Image: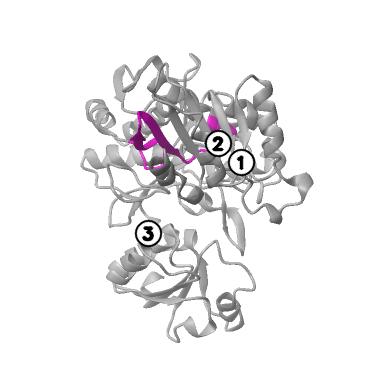
Amino acid sequence: MSQDFRHIHFIGICGTAMGAVAAAMREQGYTVTGSDAAVYPPMSTFLESKGIKLSEGYKPENLPADADLIVVGNAISRGNPEIEAVLNRKLYYLSLPETLKQFFLRGRHNLVVTGTHGKTTTTSMLTWILQSAGLNPAYMIGGIAKNLGQGSSLHDSKHVVLEGDEYDTAFFDKRSKFLHYLPELVVVNNIEFDHADIFDDLDAIKLSFRRMLNIVPENGMVLINGDDQNCIDVAEKCRAQLVEVGFSPNASRHIRDVTYDPHGSQFTLLDTRFTLQLVGEFNVRNAAMAISAAHFYGVPLDKIAEAMAAFEGVKRRQEVRGEVRGITIMDDFGHHPTAIRETLRGLRHQYPGRRLWAIFEPRSNTTRRAIFQHELPAALAEADGAILAQVARMDQLAEDNRLDPAQVVADIAAAGKPAFYEPDVTAIIARLKPLVKEPDVIVILSNGGFGGIHERLLKEL
């Protein structure tokens, strides 16, 4: 079908995944154009360097007269003037995941990494192992692995590694993105409630995972977290080969003899000793999944161990942003209580005996809501002190549905830890300055830019 297409237009082209797919289609010889609300570097300059014409703002006149296919980003909703014109003119349109499926994934070995936590790290590890083994995989990851230097490369390859998001596909398709990825191998890291803006409850999320496992072929492979009851539940009727990976002795692929030190983690899996530059139980589990997936595709264990030891991690995942007056400042994408807790526990191994400060911005669609009102204090109390920022886009939520940061702070203080609620970055830095001293570690937890707090802390401390 794809040979009928000549000109493809992307609405919302400057999103990370949209831009990557647009560039890959341009490289395949299609004429590609696109529009976005805000067209700015580095994505705009990257796309223009590929010969893609960009329009700023959404307008019906952006739609090329000869466009055969319109790709609609998942940030686009009804009322957008460009999508209204597409619908009125009855033009052919697809979501980004459907476009990936049609143009890049058919007939390939697709390895899809899913779960509430650890997707980006596990996908990056797996891609790096396959690349190190000479399999030259194509990949699409929601972050940038330091070893890979970029988040995606959709070149022609037998193997495609994809970070499989359970978030919805587009305004016209409310199913999870990963249902479009034609998986031959699936990793399910863990399943918890998240994305409160699109899922009503945990059961709705589990249904989505069941649907994905239902399309894995019998000659494929499903790797699940054998220590997570939700993963075990969703895989109950899976027809593909199923392997449980976990710390429990009952897991058929048992992670054993784990040790941690400030430089990383060591563990045994498949009778092989692995060394990892990352710390903490979550990262060991991520690594075990990536190792098991690569092993399924015949990569020798010694080659896997070599690649694992050389894996440097992912930007914005426990990433050191700098040191000032002996105080280390770190950035982490953590925004779910489980991820926050495990990140802080991992940092305890990495920085033994040092005081740990957690600065948290409630910014994701789930943590802005009151859903984790009781779980967040327990997670943040893993640090020696915590500061909460104001809830992002507060006015969009009714008060009774909104996280109450003052109450979170009161609960942490009740657990005997210093905790403060400060409305903005200036107030947070003013609060922190007299409290921190060498050799403290400050970890900034946010899934956004958080007002450039990292650079400002480095400057003002």
Mark 1 touches mark 3? (CB < 8 Å): no
Which labelled disc corresponds to residue 29? none
Find residue 399 and report its horizontal and vertical position in percent.
77, 48
Question: At which x and y percent is residue 453?
Answer: 47, 45
Q: Secondary structure at mark 2?
A: helix
* Residue 27 in view: yes
The quadrant holding residue 112 is top left
Nearest-to-viewer mark from 3 and 2: 2
Read off the magenta span: 313-340
Identified by mark 3, the residue type is Phe
Query: Is 251 included in the stretch rendered in magenta?
Result: no
**Residue displayed at 29% across by 50% down:** 158
Label 2 – label 1 distance at C-alpha:
8 Å
Please identify, in this view, whether the residue under mark 2 or under mark 1 is nearer the observer.
2
The front one of 152 and 67 is 152
Q: Earlier in the sequence, mark 1 or mark 3?
A: 3
Q: Is residue 215 left or right of residue 143?
A: right
Please name which of the two marks, 1 or 3, marks the residue nearer to the observer. 1
- Answer with left or right where residue 156 lies relative to residue 60: left
Q: Secondary structure at mark 1?
A: loop
Residue 2 found in image quarter: bottom left
Q: Which mark is residue 104?
A: 3
Query: CB atoms at circles 2 and 1 under 8 Å apart?
Result: yes
Residue at mark 2: 431
Q: Residues within 10 Å of mark 3 (few under 14, many from 20)?
A: many
